[in-house]
Amino acid sequence: MYAIIQTGGKQHKVKEGDMIDVELLGLEEGASVKFDVLMISDGKKIQIGEPTVKGYQVEGEIIGKSAGPKIKIVTYKRRKSTSRRVGHRQHYDRVKIIGIKGSKAKTSKAKSSKGAE
């Protein structure tokens, strides 16, 4: 089973146990996060959300910070003896996907057991 989630303006294909780097979420290490699901597949059936699939969430845990590759930018003006070097390194939160939770199946079981009492 896998899901497509969106965070930080980017979409990620995830399954249970994956580790992904997402834009900084502003949470502490060890904090739990939940993502809305845009699409989910169990291998046989695919559900596409409008914009999200109702009743499904992906749960994850922040396990640390990471940084992307350093990008070097050089500006140069010919015949002016002018050059400038700038670097940029994007920082990310590393998230471990704990599971894909579907509340639709759980809700239907809970309703049927409550009605029987």
Image (tube, rainbow, N blue to C red):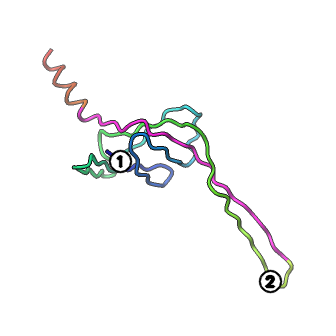
Nearest to the eye among marks 1 and 2: give it: 1
Location of the N terminus (image quadrant): top left
Q: Could you tell whether 81 is left or right of 57 in the image?
A: right
Q: Position of residue 70 (x, y in %)?
A: 67, 58
Magenta part of the protein: which range?
Answer: 82-105
Horizontal side of residue 40 vs 72, given as left or right: left
> Circle 2 sits on which residue?
78
- Look at mark 1 in the image and give the residue it sits on: 3
What's the amino acid at mark 2?
Arg
Q: Nearer the viewer, residue 42 or 7?
A: 42
Q: Residue at x 13, y 18 (%)?
A: 116
Q: Is residue 90 magenta?
A: yes
User: What's the residue at 47%, 49% (across, down)?
Assistant: 7
Left or right of 76 in this view: 50: left
As drawn, the residue found furthest toward the bottom would be 79
Bin the neighbour count of mark 1 within 10 Å (Cα to Cα): few under 14, some 14-19, many 20 and up.
many
Q: Whole-Å distance between the Cαs marked 1 and 2? A: 51 Å
Residue 108 lies within the magenta run? no
What residue is rendered at 63% in x and 50% in y?
Answer: 67
Dot 1 falls on a residue whose secondary structure is strand
